Image: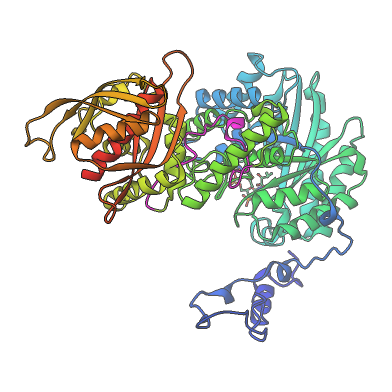
Amino acid sequence: MGQDQSSVFDLAAVAAASNGGNNDPLLPPARYIGAPQKPSKMPYNKYVAYDKQVPFDYPERTWPGKRLQRAPRWCSVDLRDGNQALVNPMDSERKLRFWNLLVSLGFKEIEVGFPSASETDYDFIRMLIERELIPDDVTIVVLTQAREHLIRKTYECLKGAKRAVVHFYNSVSVLQREVVFRKDKAGIKKLATDAATLCKELEGEAEGIDLYYEYSPESFTGTEPEYAVEVCNAVIDVIKPTPEHPMIINLPATVEMTTPNVFADQVEYMSNNLVPRDAVVLSLHPHNDEGMGVAATELAVLAGADRVEGCLLGNGERTGNVDLVTLGLNFLTQGIDPQIDYSNVPEIRKTVEYCNQLKISERHPYAGNFVFTAFSGSHQDAIKKGLEARQVAADRAGADLDSFVWLVPYLPIDPKDIGRTYEAIIRVNSQSGKGGMAYLLKTNHNLDLPKRLQVEFDKVVQAYADETKKEVKDEDIWRLFKDEYLPVEESGATAAGAVVGDSKDDSLEQWGRLKLLKVSVSSGEDGSDTVLKARILDRGVNVGVDEPVEREVSGMGNGPLAAFLNALSNFGIEASVMDYVEHTMSVGTDAMAASYVECQIGEEEDPRIVWGVGIDTSIVTSSLKAIISAINRSER
Ligand SMILES: CC(=O)SCCNC(=O)CCNC(=O)[C@H](O)C(C)(C)COP(=O)(O)OP(=O)(O)OC[C@H]1O[C@@H](n2cnc3c(N)ncnc32)[C@H](O)[C@@H]1OP(=O)(O)O
Ligand SMILES: CC(C)C(=O)C(=O)O
């Protein structure tokens, strides 16, 4: 750094003192309700806004009016940037496993390491080359600092490769020029051009390799864009790429320090000023320090970037490199082929977690355990309705459901498309409404509860959730349901669909006064009325105390339900049916039917409205069982 130049710290201190953080106390306060916010104790005066550090404006920008239209060229840097950020860097077994995953997903460019930095990297790259593990359509990239001995070692490592990219870099940022390199702009540019010159000289040693170059003005985001252009164009001038044999200029957000729109402006500026542009593959290497890596990348692609470097599920230095899985699947949800196969995200996650020895968060986009889970009632209700509406629309269009257009509230992507399942979508806790419970009963137990029954049973589930203060699992809901509506059934025999073969549930105490043992239905003599004869076990009003008795009763009515209610008056029970719904639960000769009845039971002055449920192979028997269920519940 020249004597006459001020230190970045002095400049920053001046900027900070003159309101460098853009904190403007004179701005009218934001609208608010209630008490005003108070100044915090946070040391914001220590920080200088990005535009005060590296002033830049680019009114010529065109990216805001553009839309994503095709996937960029992807390059995975998991085996290099990802690996350098691990507590335990990958051994060769883990590296190979990661490599195989990347190849199988369809990556055509893979940065395989920093061969001059470690023996493990060097040996791994040698192994890939010597064992001929690099498919013809995959290009390896190797990284080196712009330093002579490291570049020489890099070339040595590449011997025998068919095709490779030598990626060299040096930091060009205002801060690093001063504190790391202690060089002025010309000195830093010379680092880069010397490295480029050396690379060209060493090409003789790379005979037989189809060689390409990549240059990164590292810490690009902390660099004046005009100066970054100057350095990159100087490097391009040495390498002399052509449209037929281009070079990569890679713009790293080594540290994310601006909002994504500013990054996009910088990238568009670079794209418009690199010469010759048609000989350059303009690449991005975003990190995620401010949590905006994906947003910044998408805007920068609009701004003209051709290529993106990142890591699967966002591993990498500090907060990570940009997450290629999220990016790719964001493209998919915009109707754009990501050109990488992310159809089995759980498998990708498993391998990535194994190789990196780091866990993915529960909320990680697309891959986290909870991302296809709705806990709150209104979300569950909307998802359930959305899935049903989509099914109806697909049936109407005669379309295959799996490929039918995806529009479901709260779910931006069909979980099936990325190897996830619907089962995990709906989970029930005390925040859930009836929708979640109804969805689980329908999906897992083939029971499509009428709305008012959902409301009734939801109170049972809600009470259980409030009491246990835990998630209510599907098996809990099913136990609660059986206990509430199917108490005197041999539970194994009652169930259908997912629960066929479920043995009798010994964990449930059987309760309920009446049990239907046998029934026969015939027409009356004049053919108008139905005559019903039933054998019923009566455990008495005090079940467990009274002696159970079996009774034969009969009744008449204008249908089996009416005849049965008439027969039940023999037990002193007054009941009438207010609503009745039935459906089959499965197909085939042994198909089960479910019946739901809403009954009014008891004296007219003091009636009780109760739902009952019955399940049986006979639709008539299931409806009678539903009446018994309602009566038992009314006496419980
Ligand atoms: C942003 C990124 O992710 S870049 C990739 C980072 N990855 C790595 O660094 C891989 C792991 N690194 C290493 O193993 C080591 O740093 C090595 C082997 C590359 C180099 O090791 P060493 O030679 O011992 O040096 P060290 O890492 O301390 O480097 C510091 C020196 O390199 C210089 N330097 C750092 N980066 C560069 C660069 N890109 N170009 C030229 N010189 C550089 C520094 O100015 C410093 O020089 P000085 O010693 O004259 O002050
Ligand atoms: C070497 C470069 C591309 C890098 O890893 C970074 O800047 O983050």
Q: x, y percentage for residue 56?
A: 80, 65
As for residue 429 lying within the magenta part, the answer is yes
Q: Is residue 253 visible?
A: yes
Q: Residue at x 71, y 68 (%)?
A: 53
Q: Does 530 sit left or right of 290 as displayed?
A: left
- Give the extent of the magenta segment: 408-430
Asked if residue 595 is positioned above or below residue 469 in the image, the reply reads above
Quadrant of the displayed image that contains ligand 1: top right
Q: Residue at x 20, y 27 (%)?
A: 506
Asked if residue 559 is positioned above or below residue 617 in the image, the reply reads below
272 and 622: which is toward the camera: 622
Q: x, y percentage for residue 125?
A: 63, 24
Q: Residue at x 38, y 38 (%)?
A: 597
Q: Which image quadrant is residue 147 in?
A: top right
22 and 123: which is toward the camera: 22
Q: Which image quadrant is residue 636 in?
A: top left
